[in-house]
Image (tube, rainbow, N blue to C red):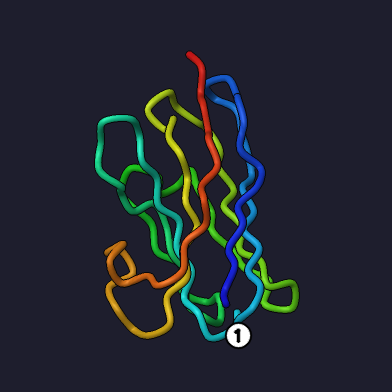
Amino acid sequence: QVHVVESGGGLVQAGGSMTLSCAVSGGTFSSYAMGWFRQAPGQEREFVSAINWSGNSPYYAVSVKGRFTISRENAKNTVYLQMRSLKPEDTAVYYCAGQLGYGDYADHREYQYWGQGTQVTVSS
């Protein structure tokens, strides 16, 4: 059984930085595309970023491009999301997800494995 665990969330001031980590166990991590999604209260889950199995193709939502960086270490079964210049509108629960296949990286329905989420709060 694949287990996905996010860490690194918390409270940060606007303009600050934070790095989220996502550890995956119980599966073949290097076979998965990995994605980050977020969900704010009362809103739908939205795509943030994704990275292919090898790590050489990152993808970003327009709202975070240039501020967030996704990366992965297959040897550590871990994917990261470095967030800079954070804004209050980045406040949400951030979810890490794994996809086995070649589905649309921005579509949360294409991901089979999900973590429980980590709260990120950006104060103004």
Task: Classify 19 as above or below 90.
Answer: below
What is the x, y in percent for residue 54? 56, 82
Residue 108: image quadrant is: bottom left
In this view of the protein, which residue sits in the foreground, 9 or 4?
4
Please tell me how crowded label 1 is: few (under 14), some (14-19), or many (20+) other residues with Cα within 10 Å.
Answer: few
Query: Which amino acid lies under the numbered mark 1 shown in the image of this protein?
Result: Thr
What is the x, y in percent for residue 28? 60, 85
Give the residue drawn at x 55%, y 42%. Answer: 118
Residue 90: image quadrant is: top left
In this view of the protein, which residue sits in the foreground, 12 or 2?
2
Give the residue drawn at x 26%, y 31%. Answer: 42
Task: Classify 45 as above or below 104.
Answer: above
Give the residue drawn at x 51%, y 47%. Answer: 117
What is the x, y in percent for residue 3? 59, 67
Q: Residue furthest top?
A: 124
In this view of the protein, which residue sits in the foreground, 66 or 46?
46
Give the residue drawn at x 40%, y 64%. Answer: 59
Q: Which residue lies furthest to the front in this view?
A: 1
77 on left or right of 69: right
86 on left or right of 10: left
104 on left or right of 86: left
Quarter of the image where the N terminus is located = bottom right
What is the x, y in percent for residue 97? 46, 63
Q: Mark 1 points at which residue?
A: 28
Q: What element carries label 1?
A: loop
